[in-house]
Image: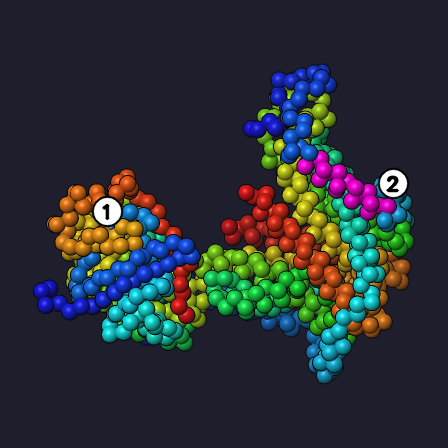
Amino acid sequence: MAFSGFDQNVVPSEMNQVIPLAKKDSPARIKMWLTIGFIAALIVASFIHLSVNPLDILTAPPTMLTFMADNFFPPNTEIVANSLPVIIETFFFAVIATYVSAVISFTLGILMSERLNRHAVVRRGVRYFVAFLRNIPVIIWGSLLVFIFGIGNIVGLIALTIATMGFLSRSYAESMNDIAGERLEAMYASGASYMQILVHGLIPEFMPAWLNWTLFSFEINIRASAILGMVGAGGMGMLINSQMNLRNFRSASMLIMILVGMILITEFTVGFLRRKMT
Amino acid sequence: MAEANTLLKISNLKKQYSKKEVLKGIDIEIKEGEFVVVIGPSGAGKSTFIRCINRMVDPTHGAIEFGGTDVAKLKGKALREARSNIGMIFQHYNLIGRTNVIKNVLHGRLGHNSFFKTLTGSYSDAEKREALTLLQKVGLGDHIYKKANALSGGQMQRVGICRAMMQDPKLLLADEPIASLDPKSAKVIMDQIHGLVTERNIACIMNLHQVQVAKDYATRIIGIKDGRVVYDGAPADLTEAMIADIYEGKAEEMELKTDNVAVGELAYGV
Amino acid sequence: MNINVNGNGKIALSSRSQQMTSFLIAVGAIGLFVISLTMINLDLVAFVGRLYRIPHILSLFMALEFSIFGEAIGELVVSIAMALAALLLGGVISLFLSFLAADNTAPSKTVAAAIKGLVSTIRAIPNIVLILMIMAALGLGPVAAVTSLTLSSIGYFTKAFASTIEEQDTALIESMRATGASWFQILVHGFFPNVMPSFLAWISIRLEMSISESISLGVIGAGGIGTMLSRAIRTHRHAEVSMLILIIFVTMLTIEILLNIVKKKANT
């Protein structure tokens, strides 16, 4: 156990007497304080720039909680029956988006792996493409696609798939690259073709990582389906949004509770399955 | 073996990694049925040398004549065909761990079969029987449906041997096949490799750290030091002084089990 | 082990149970997909009917509006400022909460369980839903945005910090308690120096998420570059949309690359 800083024999009353524990002017120390000062200045500047008083935020919860207690409770249970089809649909949309992105990301992952794709230009191109998918927030994908294709659940499906692909392709590529070293060497040496190596070598070895990442992405998809509804891409989110806009807060809070329940159950199940696999 | 034909003719083989020249011009002829053991300190270029023969590493210079063609110049399908006639055994076995034993052995036939045939696992009956016979011969007849990663190191290497034999090779390359094994399993592996290549008249080139093992099995020993051949002759003629010269400054390595030297970027000719 | 022989008398490549397992997995995987497809009602006809417009719309996006660059950067700064402000508030609050929530430092088990339950509920509410609820209470504006980002930061940090604290050796606490140090003194002098490196790592990971969330909140009207983007989309100014997307992408990519560098440095 490393005690960086204080010796355990120092009794609290002695702590006020300053025993120099590190050289005061060491360059590392100066650098550390400069960094801390810079970050502090940045954060202070942020508050000033936004003209937000931190106290406003710290005092906001009481206002919020009273508002919510007054308006969101008790939840309107009548809405459950009406929205049941949408709730079920949201789940299955996440399933399909997970399937589609798992298959496409498998291909992209191969193309992104140095050991499996030796064409540097193609590899780099795919990497930038995937980075683009990954670094645009999912809600922006949603609103862009709704703008391009019009409102509809298929747009939500595409947005979900795109967002998951960005994350999955990168994770897959890393796992594949680990496999593609020594483990596949014997197959190359025996004169197997590239496709044979993928089918008989890569896929069996990649299977556990494939399942693991894909399950994780299902969890992300369930969450994202709530987000996407906000911009008209269907699912639970759309219901919540419209109830909020109509200021039917009690209905909205019921739907939010269902959504949170769904997310918690998914999280638990996925966590359980992933632990069981390893 | 007196009138045996030349199987492999390597001339002026060089390999340069970004800065370092690992092989500095190697000339060797291997005849059918020879059991050649390559010895030398780690970093001498043994691993690079053996991997140049089937182009897992692309040589910078030189010719590798095998079966009437220069392997060093082959590409794509022709290279794969040449590789399918050269078996290889690895230090870390390199099996597909999540696939069962018999499928791993049949992987040796991938190069001889079309993609669609292997996709559905429709290997010929003769191929399957051969795989089974080989596995029974090395004592794994009871484990054919076991996942490869459930086996012990010695058992995995036996699967590796069967896989290489499935290729029906004319030449067998073995890169430190016993370096990760305990002495008892090492002996079994050496006996099995030796027995199979002798029975089938396959030439074998094997990298080894253990000089004594080399002397016990080899018909010919090649000493490589700093990218050059410094000894090439019968095991009986290899004197203690010569061994000391090969391992000059690295004497502690002679009997030790050291890990394989990194061979840099592996060349996957596709 | 017996050799499995297929119906045609040939050697099988898998044992009976392996054949059975692969068959069941294949059926299960395909079955789930097919069931899911039949359960949802894809508006495929409407979608395909609109496809002819795509090339035209995409061609409109193939332009960049540079005149808005200055304003866009200003709005980007707003988005980043909201993220940073929330990061600080969330970080400070979580620092206290995490010591109350970690099993080995919590004053009582009930407190720990209550805080853990609270933060996992917060985590389960998607950020966008959270801000809708907060905006209903507080109205539009940066206070609502920062509050919502702060809440989700607390959800993330408290869990992360607490798990780091739980990894610490309890012998340290015992020995400090033996010297008569108070709860607060134990935290400041015993724990902080040990947990700081991992806390900083959590904070840097969260920074990327926080900025991405801040931009996302903007899309539904919380201010910053996201709001600017959704306005440009609504008013069909394609070149502006492209410009804003490019700025967002470059920003997020830069942060990702910087974080990777920091991570690499921290690992060595």
Q: Based on the picture, tell me whether residue C26 belongs to the magenta stretch.
A: no
Pick the front one: B57 or A110: B57
Residue C109 at least partly seen: no
Q: Residue A55 carries which label?
A: 2
**Structural crowding at the residue carrying mark 2, measured as other residues with C-alpha within 10 Å and reported as few (<14), some (14–19) or many (≥20):** few
Q: In this picture, is C93 found above or below C108? A: below
Q: Which residue is drawn at 66% across and 36% down?
A: C196
Dot 1: chain letter: B
Q: Which residue is drawn at 20% across and 68% down?
A: B7
Along the horizontal axis of the image, is A113 left or right of B264? right
To which quarter of the image does residue B16 belong? bottom left
Q: Residue at x 85, y 49 (%)?
A: A49
Q: Position of residue B20 (x, y in %)?
A: 38, 54
Amino acid at dot 2:
Leu
The prevailing secondary structure element of the residues shown in magenta is helix
Quadrant where the image shows the N terminus of chain C: bottom left
Locate residue C110 relative to residue B127 in the image: left or right. right
- Residue bearing mark 1: B246
Subunit under mark 2: A
Q: Which of C1 and C151 is in front in this view?
A: C151
Crowd band around label 1 with a 10 angstrom C-alpha radius: few (<14), some (14–19), many (20+) = many
Determine if the magenta segment contains residue A45: yes
Q: What stretch is highlighted in magenta?
A: A31-48
In the image, residue B144 sits, relative to residue C46, either above or below, namely above
Tell me the quarter of the picture where residue C164 sits: top right
Q: Can residue C60 be seen in this view?
A: yes
